[in-house]
Image: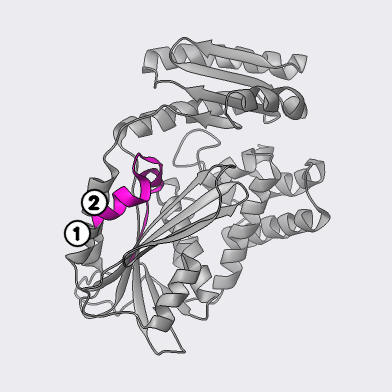
């Protein structure tokens, strides 16, 4: 299948609109670099563990024909270039085709690259001498300027069962549409997650609608009362028919919803309690947790601080806990603020809001030097 070949995506760049010439060249170099670093068969391997061609995050990026997706690919390749020569990087690269590990490893690569860019040296697991089944932090960073060593443990907070069911429903829709053709574009909203039986019926309607949108070059709507609202069109018609329809409804390409309640802060506290045990007791340590949903719930940053701070203070060998989250929001604006010892930053990258909350443990026995802590503040 052409979609699972790097060559197809490299050649497709010439047919994609919205690029500056330099961006197109950067995207091409990035795809060629990833082919070399990850292997010619990486895209095939990325489908091996999970059925559905567009389940792996790299494949989802490649299935998105917006220029921002290729800029995201270029940023990921740039992070790997920075880390070339870092100890044990090959172990991380070898598991990037694993969809169950990718979010963890992508965050690990991203933060390591940014901190190496600040002059630190990175070593991936194993990060300490291996003896007696000793637990190993994900990342060791050495600062040649201060002589400090800091260990970092990375975690991802997976979604609750109801949220996974919603995600799987959206993935099934994407698979049904792109199973017809990658020349289609979709936009829609779930009002609730359908049962398996109802989802099956919806998918059959979507396949028929996808064929009509592809063949007739028109926008086609699929609606299920109280459950789903969506539209499809040929990607050549996206700007003319799908974008205006989406804008009227506050949508972008892809899917929104449904709204699901989940107690993220309790799960964050549990995650901190588990991950601190991976870190050496006589060192200044950092925990980084990917928990996007925590920033989207009512109360946001202030709620996270009020409900999670007490858990951070329990562990005197953990100096920083960083909660990280990314979500698409083209209306978000950059922001930096402080709440007592804690710092919150929102950066905007290609319409994606990157959120970082640095929770400082003022009671930790071992602390990062002001110089090293400032490097973390510049990255997060």
Q: Secondary structure at mark 1?
A: helix
The color scheme shown is one colour
Disc number placed over residue 310 in the picture, else none: 1
> Is any part of residue 31 visible from this angle?
yes
Residue 18 at x, y percent in the picture = 78, 44
> In which quarter of the view is residue 207 placed?
top right
Q: Is residue 302 above or below residue 207?
A: below
- Front residue of 353/3: it is 353
| Residue 351: x %, y % from top left | 60, 46
Residue at 41% in and 12% down: 198
Question: Which label was assigned to residue 307?
Answer: 2
Q: Secondary structure at mark 2?
A: helix
Magenta residues, start to end: 287-308
Tell me where residue 373 appears, x and y as whole percent.
40, 76
The answer to whether residue 62 is above or below residue 188 is: below
Q: CB under 8 Å between callouts 2 and 1? A: yes
What residue is rendered at 72% in x and 55% in y? 27
Residue 220: which quarter of the image?
Answer: top right
Q: Nearer the viewer, residue 225 or 82?
A: 225
**Residue ID at (44%, 62%):** 108
Q: CA distance from mark 2 to mark 1?
A: 7 Å
Q: Is residue 191 left or right of residue 11?
A: left
Instruction: Give the x, y percent position of residue 318.
Output: 26, 70
């Amino acid at each position: 299948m052409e979609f699972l070949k790097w060559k197809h995506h490299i050649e497709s760049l010439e047919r994609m609109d919205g690029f500056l010439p330099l961006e197109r060249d950067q995207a091409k170099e990035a795809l060629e670099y990833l082919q070399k670093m990850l292997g010619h068969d990486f895209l095939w391997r990325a489908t091996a563990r999970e059925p559905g061609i567009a389940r792996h995050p790299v494949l989802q990026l490649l299935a998105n024909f917006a220029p921002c997706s290729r800029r995201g690919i270029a940023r990921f390749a740039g992070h790997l270039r920075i880390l070339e020569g870092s100890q044990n990087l090959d172990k991380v690269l070898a598991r990037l085709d694993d969809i169950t590990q990718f979010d963890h490893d992508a965050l690990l690569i991203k933060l390591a690259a940014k901190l190496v860019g600040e002059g630190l040296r990175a070593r991936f697991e194993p990060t300490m001498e291996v003896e007696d089944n000793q637990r190993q932090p994900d990342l060791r960073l050495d600062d040649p300027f201060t002589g400090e060593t800091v260990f970092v443990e990375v975690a991802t907070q997976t979604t609750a069962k109801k949220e996974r069911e919603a995600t799987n429903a959206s993935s099934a829709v994407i698979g049904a549409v792109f199973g017809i053709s990658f020349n289609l574009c979709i936009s829609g909203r779930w009002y609730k997650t359908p049962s398996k039986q109802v989802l099956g019926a919806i998918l059959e309607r979507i396949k028929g609608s996808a064929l009509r949108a592809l063949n007739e070059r028109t926008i086609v709507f699929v609606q299920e009362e109280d459950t789903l609202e969506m539209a499809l069109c040929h990607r050549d018609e996206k700007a003319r028919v799908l974008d205006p329809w989406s804008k009227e409804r506050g949508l972008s390409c892809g899917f929104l919803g449904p709204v699901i309640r989940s107690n993220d802060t309790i799960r964050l506290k549990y995650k901190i309690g588990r991950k601190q045990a991976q870190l050496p007791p006589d060192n200044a340590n950092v925990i980084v947790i990917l928990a996007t949903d925590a920033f989207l719930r009512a109360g946001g940053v202030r709620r996270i601080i009020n409900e999670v701070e007490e858990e951070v203070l329990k562990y005197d060998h953990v100096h920083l806990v960083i909660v990280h989250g990314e979500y698409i929001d083209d209306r978000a604006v950059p922001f930096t603020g402080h709440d007592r010892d804690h710092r919150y930053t929102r950066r905007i990258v290609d319409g994606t809001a990157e959120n970082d909350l640095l929770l400082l443990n003022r009671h930790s026995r071992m602390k990062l030097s002001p110089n090293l802590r400032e490097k973390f503040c510049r990255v997060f």
